[in-house]
Image: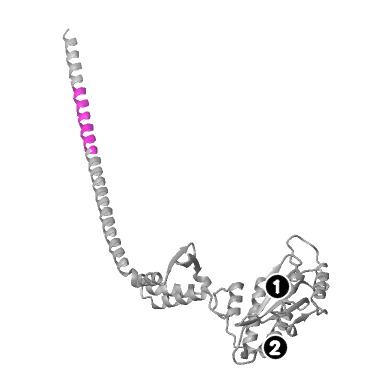
């Protein structure tokens, strides 16, 4: 957690509360003072080297937590956690100022509060880790603890199922209490529902009985908890792949009758379309035939008319010749 104000004194006072902290387990990196006021002054002097800007980060307040183990003493757990805190500070910000205190005010867990300067000792430039770098740091630390400190009896929290996302708030809650979060409960419920569902109707019935309903928004698939109205994305829960596998299995059994009906419908539509096409083809053939017949008849009519006209012309010419011959004979008699 970053702070955008130089509240070193307030945080140091809270961290050093004698009712919560155990001073003999304090962590110091790149600082020389042991008293609260002097530690504050070292952080302030180093912070003044940075160039001031609006909403600039002055410090980081981070927490390391473990659930209490049953197999070893409390002192051994505190010593192990102090070593882990030193390693974390060295990996997280080796050149920065770090002050840490161990709090033992809860029955279920131990935790360190770490105050980390935003810039390295004597450096005006700020030290920054990307989100990916910070996530990798937490994963590596968890692996280190599980491998090198099995006596602490810790469980995998950060490096769990690929695809499942865990917020910092939820991570701290689980580390602090060792209890399941609401999202873990939702995930367990959905895993059971997915495993028991035989078809799509069965899936929706079991979801409803468990108090959930499925929703799809664009490419996002999730469930809504009916009691609280809160939405949970399957991808965030790490269940998207399992849901897609389930969909591939149950979809054919559910849609079989529907598919058959659709196939029959398609066949009927194809037959109707084929009949329409054949009818149109026949109509076109008939039109073409009639057009051809009309063309032939028109041609015959034109030929007949042409012959008739020619004969009429011949008759008329012969008639005129006769009339000329008669007229010529009359003239000779005179």
Q: Which residue is mark 1?
A: 61
Q: Nearer the viewer, residue 262 or 313?
A: 262
Q: Which residue is mark 2?
A: 79
Q: Position of residue 27 (x, y in %)?
A: 75, 81
* CA distance separating discs 2 and 1: 21 Å
Q: Nearer the viewer, residue 208 or 12?
A: 12
Q: Earlier in the sequence, mark 2 or mark 1?
A: 1
Residue 40 is left or right of residue 173, and the answer is right
Placement of the N terminus among the 4 image quadrants = bottom right
Residue projecting furthest to the front: 19
Q: Position of residue 166 (x, y in %)?
A: 57, 74
Q: Toward which corner of the image does residue 112 lie, by quadrant?
A: bottom right
Question: Where is 58 relative to 19, above or below?
Answer: above
**Segment colored magenta:** 298-318
Question: Where is 14 relative to 86, above or below?
Answer: above
Q: Toward which corner of the image does residue 321 lie, by quadrant?
A: top left
State the residue at coordinates (45%, 67%). Answer: 227
Residue 128 visible here: no
Placement of the C terminus among the 4 image quadrants = top left
Tag 2 and tag 1, C-beta contact below 8 Å: no
Residue 286 visible here: yes
Question: Where is 299 relative to 16, above or below?
Answer: above
State the residue at coordinates (67%, 90%). Answer: 76
């Amino acid at each position: 957690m970053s702070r955008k104000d130089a509240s070193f004194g307030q945080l140091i006072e809270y961290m050093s509360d004698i009712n919560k902290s155990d001073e003999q387990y304090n962590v110091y990196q790149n600082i020389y003072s042991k008293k609260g006021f002097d530690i504050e002054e070292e952080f302030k002097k180093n912070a003044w080297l940075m160039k001031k800007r609006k909403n600039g980060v002055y410090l980081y307040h981070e927490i390391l937590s473990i659930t209490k183990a049953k197999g070893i003493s409390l002192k051994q757990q505190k010593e192990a956690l102090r070593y882990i805190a030193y390693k974390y500070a060295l990996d997280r910000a080796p050149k920065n100022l770090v002050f840490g205190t161990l709090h033992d005010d809860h029955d279920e867990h131990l935790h360190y509060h770490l105050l980390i300067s935003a810039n390295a000792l004597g450096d005006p430039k700020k030290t920054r880790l990307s989100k990916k770098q910070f996530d990798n740091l937490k994963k590596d630390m968890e692996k280190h603890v599980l491998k090198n400190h099995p006596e602490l009896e810790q469980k995998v929290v950060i490096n769990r199922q690929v695809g499942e996302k865990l917020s910092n708030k939820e991570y701290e809650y689980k580390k602090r209490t060792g209890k399941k979060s609401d999202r873990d409960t939702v995930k367990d419920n959905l895993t059971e529902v997915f495993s028991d569902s035989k078809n799509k109707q069965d899936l929706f019935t079991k979801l409803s009985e468990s108090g959930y309903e499925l929703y799809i928004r664009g490419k996002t698939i999730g469930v809504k908890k009916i009691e609280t109205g809160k939405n949970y994305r399957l991808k965030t829960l790490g269940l998207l792949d399992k849901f897609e596998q389930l969909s591939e299995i149950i979809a054919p059994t559910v849609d079989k009758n529907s598919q058959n009906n659709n196939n029959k419908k398609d066949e009927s539509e194809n037959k109707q379309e084929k009949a329409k096409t054949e009818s149109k083809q026949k109509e076109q053939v008939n039109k073409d035939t009639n057009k051809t017949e009309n063309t032939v008849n028109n041609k015959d009519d034109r030929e007949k008319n042409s012959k008739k006209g020619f004969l009429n012309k011949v008759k008329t010419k012969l008639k005129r010749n006769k009339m000329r011959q008669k007229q010529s004979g009359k003239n000779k008699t005179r």
